[in-house]
């Protein structure tokens, strides 16, 4: 995995937040965080029942990042509790290995404190220094204004819209906005 040794920053509420690479020891905490975020049923691609409960599955997911130096899996931790996660997975073929997809999640009670920005800024810094990565891509629900503001603040621009991309129920669809940031000139 692209490894990030870690840094500690001060959240808007004054708490110290450590941003670091995830390890296998984080598996249970990542499951709990993923389930809590998915249970809100907004702004996620994953339903809560799709989050693996099996520790070995989660460890395999974490190890997927360690098998490719173009990937990065970060966690945000405060008071020994995981409160955020950000993953970047580069394309698996040579022609698309310079680009990849970002995912971001922050525990509800820790949103608005700058943790999402800390995670994204760390990925941007890592990618900028990386020999292969040139472009970071993400999708965001069209109605997730808070996230769009953050992404735009960090330099991401809209590249397109996928109509009715996410299906919450038989009658509720959400468009996805594709956004990207070029980290190399």
Image (cartoon, rainbow, N blue to C red):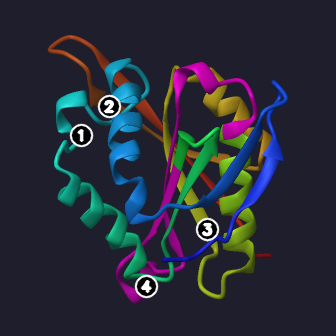
In the rendered structure, find residue 35 and report the number of the disc placed on it: 2
- Asked whether residue 151 is in view, the answer is no
In the rendered structure, which segment of residues is drawn in magenta? 86-115
Circle 1 SS class: loop
> How far, Cα to Cα, is label 2 from label 1?
6 Å
Relative placement, left or right, of 148 versus 165 is right
In the rendered structure, find residue 51 and report the number of the disc placed on it: 1
> How far, Cα to Cα, is label 2 from label 3?
29 Å
In the rendered structure, find residue 95 and report the number of the disc placed on it: 4
Q: Earlier in the sequence, mark 4 or mark 2?
A: 2
Q: Which residue is more in the foreground, 66 or 95?
A: 66
Label 4: few (<14), some or many (≥20) within 10 Å?
A: few
Position above or below: 170 against 137: above
Label 2: few (<14), some or many (≥20) within 10 Å?
A: some
> How far, Cα to Cα, is label 1 from label 4?
31 Å
Circle 2 SS class: helix
Circle 4 SS class: helix
In the rendered structure, find residue 135 and report the number of the disc placed on it: 3
Do tag 1 and tag 4 residues touch (Cβ < 8 Å)? Answer: no
Q: Earlier in the sequence, mark 3 or mark 4?
A: 4
Does the segment drawn in magenta span residue 16? no
Percent of width and height locating residue 116 = 66, 39
Circle 3 SS class: strand
Label 1: few (<14), some or many (≥20) within 10 Å?
A: some
Task: Give the residue displayed 62% in from the left and 60% down from the top.
Answer: 20
């Amino acid at each position: 995995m692209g490894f990030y040794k870690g840094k500690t920053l001060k959240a808007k509420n004054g708490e110290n937040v450590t941003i670091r690479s995830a390890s296998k020891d984080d598996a249970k905490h990542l499951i709990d965080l993923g389930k809590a975020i998915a249970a809100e049923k907004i702004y996620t691609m994953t339903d809560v029942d799709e989050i693996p409960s099996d520790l070995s599955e989660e460890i395999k997911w974490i190890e997927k990042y360690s098998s490719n130096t173009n990937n990065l899996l970060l966690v945000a931790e405060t008071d020994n509790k995981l409160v955020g996660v950000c993953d970047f997975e580069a394309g698996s073929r040579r022609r698309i290995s310079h680009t990849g997809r970002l995912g971001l999640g922050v525990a509800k009670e820790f949103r608005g404190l700058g943790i999402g920005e800390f995670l994204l800024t760390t990925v941007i810094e890592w990618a900028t220094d990386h020999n292969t990565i040139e472009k970071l891509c993400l999708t965001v629900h069209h109605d997730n204004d808070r996230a769009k503001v953050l992404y735009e603040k960090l330099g991401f621009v809209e590249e397109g819209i996928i109509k009715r991309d996410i299906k919450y129920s038989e009658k509720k669809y959400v468009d996805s906005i594709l956004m990207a940031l070029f980290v190399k000139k």
